[in-house]
Image (spheres, grey):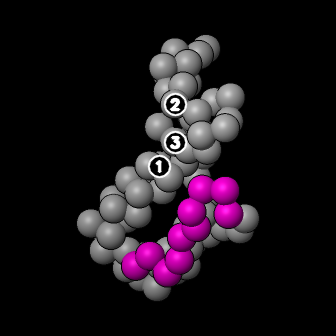
Amino acid sequence: MDENKVIDNLCGHLERQGWTIDSRVAAGDRGIDVIATDPKGIKFHIEAKGGTSSRAGSSRHGKWEDALCSS
């Protein structure tokens, strides 16, 4: 799963749990991937990591099988 999909899934999960997504970055952008606030008002800075690359020129682009099967 590339980092964009990880961020999408993470944000969706957090929102379903009542969190607020304050900001998120697109793959390749610098900075904190997700800034989210929990239902109690505590702010979290989250760094997401994907197993493949969403960048077409990358050697890891679309190699989810390798990411899933590596030991």
Query: Which of the labelled discs sits on residue 40, or is there none?
Result: none
**What amino acid is labelled 1 in the image?**
Val
Task: Single out the mark in the foreground, 1 or 3.
Answer: 3
Quadrant, the C terminus: top right
Residue lying farthest bottom?
41
Residue at the spot of label 3 = 2
- Residue 4 image offset from top left, x and y in percent: 50, 52
User: Is residue 24 within the magenta segment?
Assistant: yes
> Residue at horizontal 33%, vertical 69%?
15
Neighbor class of circle 3 (other Cα within 10 Å; few <14, some 14-19, many 20+) is many
Q: Nearer the viewer, residue 41 or 20?
A: 20
User: Label 2 belongs to which residue?
Assistant: 62
* Residue at the (48%, 20%) spot, across then down: 65
For this view, does 39 lie left or right of residue 27? left
Label 2 neighbour load within 10 Å: few <14, some 14-19, many 20+: some
Q: Is residue 46 visible?
A: no
Vertical arrangement, residue 50 with respect to residue 36, above or below: above
Q: Which residues are magenta?
A: 20-29
Marks 1 & 3, CB-CB < 8 Å contact: yes
- Counting every numbered tag in the picture gives 3
Vertical side of 50 occupied by 44: above or below = below
| Residue for badge 1 | 6
